[in-house]
Image (spheres, helix red, strand yellow):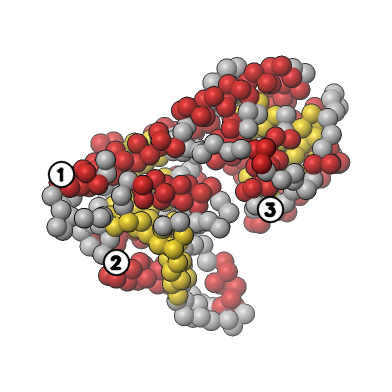
Amino acid sequence: MTLRICMTTLEFPPDVGGVGESVFRISQMLISLGFDVHVAVFRAVFRDEKSEAEAGLFRRSSCQTSTVNGVTVHRLKAAVRSPMAKEQDYLCDLYDQLAALHTQYRFDLLHAFFINEMGFLTTLLAQENDLPVINSIRGADLQKHLFSPQQLSQISWTLANSDWVTFVSQDLMHRARVLVPSIRTKSSAFWNSITPIDFETLPQPALVERLRGTVIGSSGNFRDKKGLEYLLDACKLLNAQADITLLLVGDFVEKERVYWEQEVAASGLGDCLVITGKVSRTEALAYLPHMDIFAIPSIHDGCPNTLLEAMLAARAIVGTPVDAIGEILDHEEDALLVPPASSEALAAALSCLVDAPDFRHRLGLAARQKVLQALAPGVEQQNWQKVYQMVLSRWPVAGSEPSQLTAVAS
């Protein structure tokens, strides 16, 4: 008997974002373990829906289903019926669609990525239908959303009612266990993985001709948690001493754009700062070989895929000892680690690497060796196999004996 699972997520390729990339990677691992994998994709922030309603553009709820690399993907959209609709109207609509998917496909297990809205809807559906449920915390869901009085009770309830909870860092797991101590016996933390990349086959990216001197790079969706202010400060200090370029591969999140434009202007970096704007993952990867140093000065950051990509590219890395960044990297062995929110410490570490190309090379090679061994896809797949096997062994599935469940996930 093939067990059917449904993963719920806010994004899935071709959507741009680390959560979507992780869900796609994990879906492929689960398919190779013998599961029938469905993914339900929906957003739990309704700015677009509210704008459409205010403009008089209404619509019915919808579900578009397609098959992507063996995964059955359901893209859900809530109905837009009124400019006076509230969050609960949209979330109630999405819950009804999730329930309809279960009625149609009869899932054996549910797995949510992101603890608040996704996790709550998925766990409620599981509880009401006597299904096992896994919740996977990725980062911002516990680093920021728990400070919302409206979301804290949902987050706590979801954690308490999960059959298993996974985390991408020990720091995240510690916070969740402080919040809900009962999950100590049903939680685990393990890192993301990454498939090796042949950087030599990637096309030359568009803005390479603007890069001068020692290139300090960073990539991602730039927002509050990334510590970008301190990188701008550090490069301003460095710019007076050395020939550098700060390369930011990505764009600012829209709600913070004015703030970041103000910070960029105040940095005075001028032509020494290159910002690509939103690019595809392929183009973002193509910039990595053109960086001499990869900076990831995050305040908190889960287990960022951009870090693993920089390690694969054998870049010298300067990071902060937060979440999985500090767990993966070892100071002066495969990276330099500095305290978060310290422009001075960041500038000192960057200056050290600007002046020491041989040291940069040694750190980069050590980082690449680590990511190929400790963060290989096979390691992550074994972790997911253990989680699924533990959860399913506790739940009788129609038509299956416990021994069959073990065989499916082995």
Numbered disc 3: secondary structure: loop
Residue 151 lies, with reference to residue 243, above or below; the image says below
For label 3, count other residues whose C-alpha is less than 10 Å away and answer few (under 14), some (14-19) or many (20+).
Answer: some
In the rendered structure, the answer to whether residue 89 lies left or right of residue 394 reads right
Residue 100 lies, with reference to residue 220, above or below; the image says below
Q: Position of residue 66 (x, y in %)?
A: 45, 67
Q: Is residue 160 visible?
A: no
Q: At x 24% / y 41%, what residue is drawn?
A: 390
Viewer-closest of 15 and 330: 15
Numbered disc 1: secondary structure: helix
Q: At x 72% / y 21%, what residue is drawn?
A: 353
Q: Earlier in the sequence, mark 3 or mark 2?
A: 2
In the rendered view of the protein, which quadrant contains the N terminus?
Answer: bottom left
Q: Quadrant of residue 287?
A: top right
In the rendered structure, the answer to whether residue 160 lies left or right of residue 225 reads left
Viewer-closest of 226 and 60: 60
Q: Earlier in the sequence, mark 1 or mark 3?
A: 3
Residue 410 lies, with reference to residue 72, above or below; the image says above
Q: Residue at label 1?
A: 403
Q: Residue at label 3?
A: 278
Viewer-closest of 116 and 163: 163
Viewer-closest of 72 and 273: 72
